[in-house]
Amino acid sequence: MADVKGVGMTRGRMFLLILFKSLKVRKNRVAITFFSIMIGASIITALASVYFDISAKMSRELRAYGANFFIGQKAASESRTSDAGVVKDAMALIPSDKLIGASPYIYGVVRLDLGNAVLAGVDFAGMKKLSPYWQVEGKWISVDFDEDSCMIGKTLAKNMELKVGDSVNVIRNETGFQRSLVVKGIAETGQAEDEQIFVNLALAGRILGQQGRVNHAMLSIVTEGTDIDALAARVQAEFPGLDAKPIRKVSHSDGRILDKIKGLMAIIAVIILTVTTLCVMTTLIAIVSERTREIGLMKAIGADDRDIVRQFLAETLTIGLAGVAAGMLLGFLLAQLLGQAVFGSFISFRMVVLPVTLIPSIAASLLAAALPVRMAVRVVPAQVLKED
Amino acid sequence: MFFIMLRQSFVKGWRRKALATATIVLAASLITALMNISIDVGDKMSKEMKSYGANISLVPKSENISLEIGGVDYNPLEGQVLIEERELPKIKGIFWANNVVGYAPFLKVSAEMAGSAQRVPLLGTNFDKAVAVDGDEEFRIGVRVINPYWQVAGEWPAEDDADSILVGAVLAGERNLKAGDRVALRATGEKGAAQTFTVTGILSTGGAEESAFVASLATVQRLAALEGKVQSVSVSALTVPEDKLSRKARRSSDALDSLEYDRWYCTAYVSAITHQIEEAIPNISARPIWQVAASEGAVINKIQLLMIVVTIAAFIASGLGISSLMVTTIMERAKEIGLTKALGAADREVYLLFLSEAALVGVIGGLLGCAVGAGLSQVIGLSIFGSLISFNFVVIPVNVAISVLIALAGSLMPSRLITRLYPAEVLHGRR
């Protein structure tokens, strides 16, 4: 009993001793193994981190397309406008970290010097974020309370013979309003905005005699999957008088494009993962194969095959774990570099990246060590030890 | 002697060489696939981006300022200028004709429903119609081609079906209409009997079309006695993102010198395409719809950048992977090198041996890798975009050069280490 236990302990000690010596003496090989596992793990970590974050990042980029959500009056109701306060409350339901930009709109027809035009009252600060695609000559109106300036659509500007810096008289007969406004910027969109004149919401309310009223609001919201429909349902439930809906043209296409990008990233990540793992394996196979002599020696002094395999696996596992740990750190840094270079923002850390990196890296390392060792243990010690 | 050694090294150490070649094949195929996709991803995504709808709108040149708010026109224009429908196929005759994916003409008139005084908009358009143009036998136009986000609950009417009509979702809600109902419509201002249509489906677009009836173009033209006329045309074209040159051209095309003008004209900028359409069809004004045109550029630039950065990362990783493998395969040959040196080989010759071995492995691995990578990129193209990735031949020399360089770089460091060893030490077995 004691004998067996003694042998067991000796074996255990022997095992640790060989492991320790092997790591200490073969610094070069250990370094290369560690290095290649670390590189493999870091590239896997970096890509996995980017992959899991790509939806969030790209859906933010897709907000370049502008508004994807509409809050307005119920189609059936008589009045075409709603109370600005209610619409504002409805807009406040959208989580602020998801909201890229938003603006209420009020429309009416006014007379300019050379003819009639549609006047739109907007919140310029929100508008600029809502519609990054506006091609503006001159400047955006930057302050909310600017009541002496306007922006004007390109076609309208051409027809009214207006340039940036000119003044234009805005007249509304019904309210008797008349004021001269300076054209701050000329906007080109290729759509209805080209024929409209834009002023501040409060000023528009006074011009049109509709203070505190808005026609509708447009919002640009970061969404993934179908949560925009859920959002619409929530706003609808809280404000039954309003009509809240995704703007199909944008939200539908966003979903399609996101799916494509995600699919592309997924396939690329899987391919890189496979290839990197195989690369690490070939390096490890090369390192382990050259130790056939050592295996012969171990067999000659009485180690059985299982011991040897266990010995090599333990060695690889030790180096592998250290390599993966270092690789994860390095990979996370690499992901940040990627995120900064492409999206100008940090990639968030996700727990799921840990197993995604750890499992293939360690499995590949162990497999790469086991294959050549298993082949090596079959050799006859004398043959190997005599000469290669 | 040198060649004998080189051959011996490949014949005797074939397993070692096979391993090194395999690693390079893997790395090279990865880089090939990624490079191929990086080059083609812009075109591919640009096609996908067409789901956002048309990016160019054509309107008559002398159009007055419209006073339309939320689909209600406060200034219905009498005798307005319209576009001739027969001019439209000329869009497929411009320099960038192949980039024109499709177009859809629109004619919007005001109509009266029988038994109701209130006017409703009636929109005429092509749904999905084959048009014969030179060089593209299967060219199709219509809203189903250019606006894939239009959704119909029910059936789309056939192109030549003069009795079917779609009703916008909002209008359907207001008038309590559903598929299968019959409505009688008459263009405002036209005398004669109202025509009866069958509603085949409810249309959702998220735009002004939802408050209108939508029928085939020919039907609306006939109802409004405007045969052969359209009011506006939406064009969907594949474009490249805007850059400095196109912005300069947009400010004023006179500011370009002739070389710049040629380059601008022969690049698929949205501004160049609108310019060419205006040249081809007189009396129209072609305007980029910036919501689609500008945003597409921004997003595609992002995706391209992402692909390039990922390719670089994969490139560095595989470079390091190959290097570490080279280090092992050379270090284990210390004994052999000791022997050659003891027999009188100069350091230079040892270098030459290792480097030519590395170069050979690099060339073989790089070429095989290109082949595997080309296959890999097609798999990606087919599974994601449903089409083949065009193979760019510049990838082959670049890839082989890169593989050789990595193999050489990876061999250089261990070769130096190994030539510095003393033969006696190595042969004795101490190192």
Image (cartoon, coloured by chain):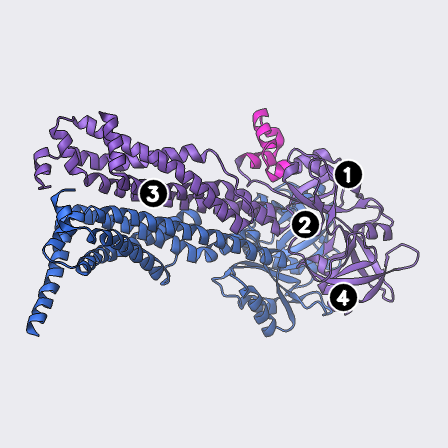
Picture coordinates of residue A297, whole percent (x, y): 12, 51
Tell if the residue under mark 2 belongs to the same chain as the one under mark 1: yes
Q: Nearer the viewer, mark 4 or mark 3?
A: 3
Q: Secondary structure at mark 1?
A: helix
For disc 4, the marked residue is B179
* Chain with colour purple in the figure: B
Q: CA distance from mark 4 to mark 1?
A: 35 Å
Question: In this image, A226 relative to B81: left or right?
Answer: left
Per the rendering, the mark at residue B87 is 1
Question: In this image, B167 relative to A263: left or right?
Answer: right
User: Which residue is found at the position 57% from the left and 25% from the top?
Assistant: B259
User: Which residue is found at the position 58% from the left and 32% from the top?
Assistant: B264
Q: Earlier in the sequence, mark 2 or mark 1?
A: 1
For disc 3, the marked residue is B22
Q: CA distance from mark 2 to mark 1?
A: 20 Å
Instruction: Please name the color used to draw chain A.
Output: blue
Q: Quadrant of the N terminus of chain A?
A: bottom left
Which amino acid type corresponds to the residue marked 1 in the rendered image? Answer: Glu
For disc 2, the marked residue is B145
Tell if the residue under mark 4 belongs to the same chain as the one under mark 3: yes
Q: Secondary structure at mark 4?
A: loop
Chain letter for the residue marked with disc 4 in the picture: B
Q: Write the start and end of the magenta stretch as one range.
A: B245-273
Which amino acid type corresponds to the residue marked 3 in the rendered image? Answer: Ala
The relative height of residue B352 versus residue A314 in the rendered view (above or below) is above
| Few, some or many residues within 10 Å of mark 3 (<14, 14–19, 20+) | many
